[in-house]
Image (cartoon, rainbow, N blue to C red):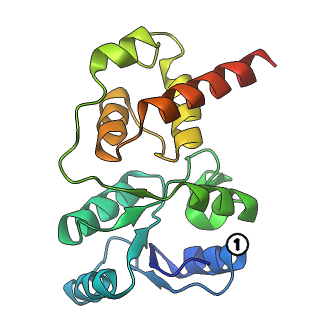
């Protein structure tokens, strides 16, 4: 059972999260209209019970996530891929299948503060995660497998380091993605 306050963008997102996870504590930001009062409340709840940010996988969702992260650095994060959150051209948590929301919450991530430099751009180049024809496809699959969301190469590298993804976890996920590709 998730004890933290889950922060989503809208009422429909909150409804979908509750359907997927049961009786959880959820607050919505009203989109980008996140007020100072709500930010203060989220910060207070982070001290009391912890906070998990689960915004839409789009530009506005990332802006809201970054705004909360700046105000509440101890917040945890859950990501959903754009593909899984899109229905008839509309992107949002509320569009995801309930089992995909549950799956996303199996990969709760917490910012490690100052990112370690475990990974470099050379690692990503060597593994074909940047600079190759299928780089984006591989990053999307790995982002989902690792629970760090969809991103470009620079953001992918940043998230690997920021969330302290271990080399073992990273290599295992690459192997799973490559095996899945062959099947």
- Please state if 12 lies on the left or on the right of 4 as rendered: right
Image location of residue 77, percent across then percent down: 42, 60
Residue 177 pos. (x, y %) = 64, 26
Q: Secondary structure at mark 1?
A: helix
The residue nearer to you, when weighing 70 against 30, is: 70
Numbered label tally: 1
Q: Which residue is mark 1?
A: 20
Q: Residue at x 23, y 65 (%)?
A: 73
Left or right of 123, for residue 39: left
Residue 131, visible in the rendered structure: no
Q: Within the image, what quadrant is residue 164 found in?
A: top left
Question: Where is 27 relative to 51, above or below?
Answer: below
Quarter of the image with the C terminus in it? top right
Residue 163 locus on image (x, y percent): 35, 47
Can you name the residue that lies furthest to the front here?
168
Bin the neighbour count of mark 1 within 10 Å (Cα to Cα): few under 14, some 14-19, many 20 and up. some
**Left-right relation of 183 to 51:** right
Task: Residue 120: name its quadrant.
Answer: top left
| Residue in the image at 53% along x and 41% along y | 146
Above-or-below relation of 107 to 125: below
Residue 1 percent across, percent down from the top left: 62, 78
User: Does the image show residue 34?
Assistant: yes
């Amino acid at each position: 059972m998730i004890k933290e306050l889950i922060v989503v963008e809208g009422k429909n997102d909150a409804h979908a999260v509750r359907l997927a996870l049961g009786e959880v504590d959820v607050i919505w930001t009203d989109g980008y209209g996140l007020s100072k009062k709500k930010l203060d409340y989220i910060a207070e709840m982070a001290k009391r019970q912890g906070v998990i940010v689960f915004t839409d996988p789009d530009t506005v969702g990332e802006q809201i996530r970054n705004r909360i992260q700046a105000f509440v650095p101890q917040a945890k994060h859950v990501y959903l891929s754009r593909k899984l959150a899109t229905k008839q051209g509309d992107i949002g948590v509320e569009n995801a299948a309930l089992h995909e929301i549950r799956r996303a919450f199996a990969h709760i991530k917490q910012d490690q503060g100052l990112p370690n430099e475990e990974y470099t751009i050379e690692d990503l180049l060597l593994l074909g995660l940047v600079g190759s024809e299928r780089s984006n496809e591989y990053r999307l699959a790995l982002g989902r497998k690792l629970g760090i969301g969809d991103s470009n190469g620079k953001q992918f590298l940043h998230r690997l380091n920021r969330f302290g993804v271990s080399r073992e976890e990273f290599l295992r996920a690459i192997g799973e993605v490559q095996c899945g590709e062959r099947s």
